[in-house]
Amino acid sequence: MSEKNEEKNSFPATPKRRVGGLGRGLNALIEGSYEKKSERMGGLVPHPVNSVGLIPVGQIQANPYQPRTHFDQDALRELAESIRVQGIIQPVTLRQTGTNSYQLISGERRLQASKLAGLDAIPAYIRKADDQQMLEMALIENIQRENLNAIEIALSYQRLVSECNLKQEELGDRVGKNRSTVTNYLRLLKLPPDIQIGLRDTVISMGHARALISIESMDQQLALFRRIVAEELSVRKVEQLVRGGSGSETEKKTANAPEPVVPVAEIKRTERHLSERFGSRVMVKPGPQGRGEIKIAFDSVEDMQRILHILQPS
């Protein structure tokens, strides 16, 4: 085979960049052996199961079972810049679906960031997996992310139970949690949608939600949730209110607590909009009977003057 044909049939190498030490990451560790193997075989390099190789990004299809639907674009750009400098430290995981075709099992962010970084090929671990294993691995990787909120974790647990036919004890073994922890997360899905949204948007904490679960009446759950938001009640205070018992004066007051005029979701949208407008953290705190307050944080006198200038009518 001519050198021209050999070069044409070879996988495109990851762009070479001069960086110090081990800066090129895993690419640098596997690229040398990959190139030597390509020279010996005179063309395409087979990638056996349970091996790591450089795979062209154009041959990698998305995971159809990917549970994540939103990826923070700023975080992706930061990861892409890191990959440009350091290379990919941890390979993505794929299954082979054809001669030059692969399907992503895990590593969606790394794949997207690698495309943004302009890489032609990325290191990947090739393994066998059927459709159910694909779903299970994608969900478990999703659960292991550090920035998941409690509802996202609960929904992933529920999918593993219902779609992968796992018992709660088996699920706990798979994700490294005890059964009681798994059960507590799954119970969150029994809360009313408004409370689940509040937990998802960090309006309340996991501690607040666990206290609310112990209330049998959905109306009383919602009433106490609204009071938590309006009065910024601590978890300990909520637990004290719940322990007051059915029919107590405290619970009656909670059940009759006025509903905020502005929905929680609208409050969070308003906070995000105002924070972008002023370039500072803005907190909207609703109170009873439609009252409330808006707080704008500033870091210095100069920052305060900047905010006051924005507030002045043009």
Image (cartoon, rainbow, N blue to C red):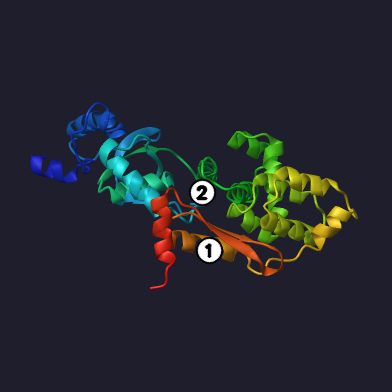
Q: Is residue 37 visible?
A: yes
- Is 87 drawn above or below residue 156 in the view shown? above
Residue at the spot 63% in from the left edge and 48% down from the top edge: 154
Q: Which mark is residue 194?
A: none
* Left or right of residue 257, residue 71 in this image: left
Residue 164: give x, y in percent of width and height: 61, 47
Q: Earlier in the sequence, mark 2 or mark 1?
A: 2
Q: Could you say which is closer to the camera, residue 37 or residue 24?
A: 24
Q: Which mark is residue 269?
A: 1
Residue 106: give x, y in percent of width and height: 44, 44
Residue 265: give x, y in percent of width and height: 59, 63
Amino acid, disc 1: Arg
Q: Is residue 279 visible?
A: no
Q: Quadrant of the N terminus?
A: top left
Residue at the spot 37% in from the left edge and 37% down from the top edge: 91
Marks 2 and 1, how far apart in space? 38 Å
Q: Quadrant of the C terminus?
A: bottom left
* Left or right of residue 170, residue 272 in this image: left
Q: Which residue is mark 2?
A: 131
Residue 264: give x, y in percent of width and height: 62, 62
Amino acid, disc 2: Asp
* Left or right of residue 39, residue 262 in this image: right
- Is 127 drawn above or below residue 198 in the view shown? above
Name the image quarter holding residue 87.
top left
At numbered mark 2, what does the secondary structure look like: helix, strand or loop? helix
